[in-house]
């Protein structure tokens, strides 16, 4: 047999074998993707319990306007309190997600940004990041009342003033897991998945 023809046949056999291996790997990636459960916001052990009344804290935003945190709301809207900082790189990454959520969830959700520290630094942060559409409050007691120890941290308070979800937020999926937890009536997505697995 001609050596050139033989080498071409071997080469084609190798190419076909590689194609089959790639298809098998693609299938496995799909199977793994289906098996991986969604990861929600990380709930820390300490802090307020889900289902408790959230602390009602009157504060003022950077413009001096009064902002009410917690408590029953006559407008029937839910409040997302997001703790951020100008020195937190993850917070800056999440700001476009918050802006997007403000638009997509505007029918039922109000977002309030909270921090503490220097007024001038915080005001510059708001201008640089284009956050003027959010109420932005500076209050160390607010962070203490919600026992915030790490950033970025979010708290979801329903229209009755009840804490519905909370946790560390590092991605869009984490933020949306708070909305899903409220919708499903569970403390977290992890609780929901654990209940489903034990049933």
Image (cartoon, rainbow, N blue to C red):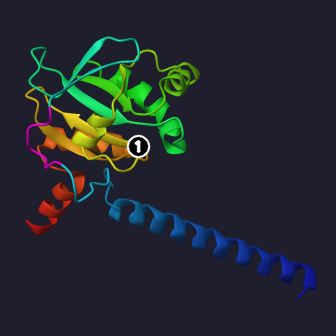
Quadrant in the rendering for residue 68: top left
Q: How many residues crowd mark 1 within 10 Å: few (<14), some (14–19), many (20+)?
A: many
Residue at 23% over, 60% down: 45
| Helix, strand or loop: magenta stretch | loop
Magenta stretch: includes residue 49: yes
Residue at 8% over, 37% down: 53
Q: Relative to 69, is 36 above or below?
A: below
> In this picture, which residue range is highlighted in magenta?
48-55
Task: In this rendered view, identify the residue nearer to me: 14 or 167.
Answer: 167
| Residue placed under numbered mark 1 in the picture | 152
Quadrant in the rendering for residue 31: bottom left
> Which quadrant is home to the N terminus?
bottom right
Q: Relative to 82, is 10 above or below?
A: below
Residue at 32% over, 25% down: 112
Residue at 47% over, 21% down: 131
Q: Is mark 1 on a helix, strand or loop?
A: loop
Task: In this rendered view, identify the residue nearer to me: 19 or 84.
Answer: 84
């Amino acid at each position: 047999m001609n050596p050139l023809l033989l080498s071409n046949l071997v080469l084609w056999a190798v190419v076909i074998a590689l194609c089959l291996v790639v298809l098998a790997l693609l299938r496995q990636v799909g199977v793994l993707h289906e098996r991986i459960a969604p990861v929600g916001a990380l709930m820390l052990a300490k802090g307020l319990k889900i289902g408790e009344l959230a602390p009602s804290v009157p504060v003022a935003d950077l413009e001096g306007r009064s902002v009410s945190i917690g408590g029953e709301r006559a407008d029937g809207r839910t409040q997302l309190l997001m703790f951020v900082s100008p020195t937190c790189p993850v917070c800056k990454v999440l700001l476009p997600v918050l802006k997007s959520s403000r638009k997509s969830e505007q029918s039922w959700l109000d977002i309030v940004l909270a921090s503490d520290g220097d007024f001038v630094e915080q005001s510059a942060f708001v201008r640089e990041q284009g956050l003027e559409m959010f109420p932005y409050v500076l209050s160390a007691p607010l962070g203490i009342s919600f026992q915030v120890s790490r950033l970025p941290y979010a708290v979801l308070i329903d229209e009755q003033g009840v804490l519905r979800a909370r946790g560390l937020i590092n991605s869009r999926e984490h933020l949306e897991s708070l909305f899903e937890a409220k919708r499903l009536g569970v403390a977290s997505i992890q609780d929901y998945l654990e209940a489903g697995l034990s049933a």
